[in-house]
Amino acid sequence: MTRVQVVDTTMRDGANSFSHQFTTDQVSAIAAGLDHAGVKLIEVTHGDGLGGSSLQLGRAAHSDPEYITAAVKAVKDARIAVLYVPGIATLNDLAVAQECGAQAVRIAVHCTEADCAEQAVRWAREQGLEVLCFLMMSHMVEPEVLAQQAALLDSYGAHVVYTVDSAGALTPSGAAARVRAMRDRVSCEVGFHAHNNLGCAVGNTLAAIDEGATYVDGSLRGLGASAGNAATEVLVAALEREGHKTGINLFDLVDVAEDIVAPIMPRPQVIDATALTIGYAGVYGTFFLFAKRAAEKYGVDSREILLELGRRGVIGGQEDMIIDVAAELASKTGVRIGVGVRA
């Protein structure tokens, strides 16, 4: 069976569910636990990556260098990865992250904009970083189009190229088709990053592995944007049941999830009405809290906001559209601002 590299993103994607308020002590404890369990690659930054702490995207409790340093000091064997989104992060941010001890970077671009990653990929390779590239919102294009974009990232020097289901909109057949198309076009490794809005995160990941993915992502207790990610501990259990090798001690991993992460979670990671609608409408997972807040402020249904965002094809980086759509819906229905309805 396949040897699978499980990457944990609790302290990056999970920061979205925490409104980016992880403490450095929490980061240290989680990183140490993951390292002890045998997880070899751990992602740590603001939920929107390096440079993401802002009024628009949400202020973090600490700076990215502080988070990275806390994680690096806590681990013995694991490598610390950071997220880099062109247009949010700069190469200087990445250089600082490397100085703090980061050894890998995950460079994320929209699924049709691989060329936006070229500069960062080439620079990171020159600096000796492990480079993993994300094609976000991968459900929005057909598999062959996605594979063409993956081939560009491969040509720039990516070690791994990911199909990223940012909206949790894929089902197993769609996940498999995209990974298969990418596997046929690239010479580098292929990865898969799942969200659980349709309840398919672990199933999609298994389908991706069947088609050649060797890097897969999870977060402890599924902690992540909107409905969350594939739960790392559940994913590892499922992989072991399928006969895949991860090098991770399942019960040590479960202990980290139960004893460290569960007590600090602000809310259970469930598929509520808003999270489900994100997957159904195919909109970016980090819109979850923004849509809830806009629904409360403008007295409209968050589901209507998300469906309209989906119809307009709004993607990450266009968070201001959430307020615009909520205000438009409120004006059409004549509701009073501040009168909350279902969120």
Image (spheres, grey):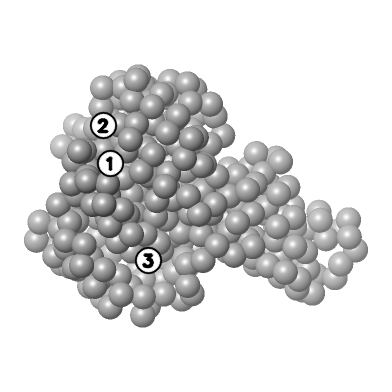
Kind of residue at disc 1: Tyr
Q: Image point 34% across, 31% down: which residue?
A: 211
Verify CB contact (< 8 Å) between mark 1 and mark 2: yes
Q: Earlier in the sequence, mark 2 or mark 3?
A: 2
In which quarter of the view is residue 212 placed? Answer: top left
Residue 117 position in % (x across, y down): 38, 32
Amino acid at pointer 3: Arg
Q: Looking at the picture, which amino acid does disc 2 mark? A: Glu
Question: Is label 3 in a helix, a strand or a loop?
Answer: helix
Give 210 or 117, whichever is nearer the viewer.
210
**Badge number at residue 215:** 1
Residue at left 41%, top 75%?
265
Query: Can the viewer see residue 313 in this picture?
Result: yes
The residue that appears at 52% across and 59% down in the rendered structure is 226
Q: Earlier in the sequence, mark 1 or mark 2?
A: 2
Disc 3 residue crowd, few under 14, some 14–19, many 20+, Cα 10 Å? many
Q: Which mark is residue 221?
A: 3
* Residue at far bottom of view: 263
Q: Give the quadrant of residue 169.
A: top right
Classify the position of the C terminus by image quarter: bottom right
**Residue 11, horizontal then vertical, whole percent:** 33, 62
> What residue is disc 2 on?
189
Residue 55 shows in the view: no
Q: Earlier in the sequence, mark 3 or mark 1?
A: 1
Could you tell whether 319 is left or right of 111 in the image?
Answer: right
Residue nearest the observer in this picture, 119 or 283: 283
**Separation of residues labelled 3 and 1 (CA atoms):** 19 Å
Callout 2 environment at 10 Å: few (<14), some (14 to 19), or many (20+)? some
In this view, the residue in front, 331 or 217, is 217
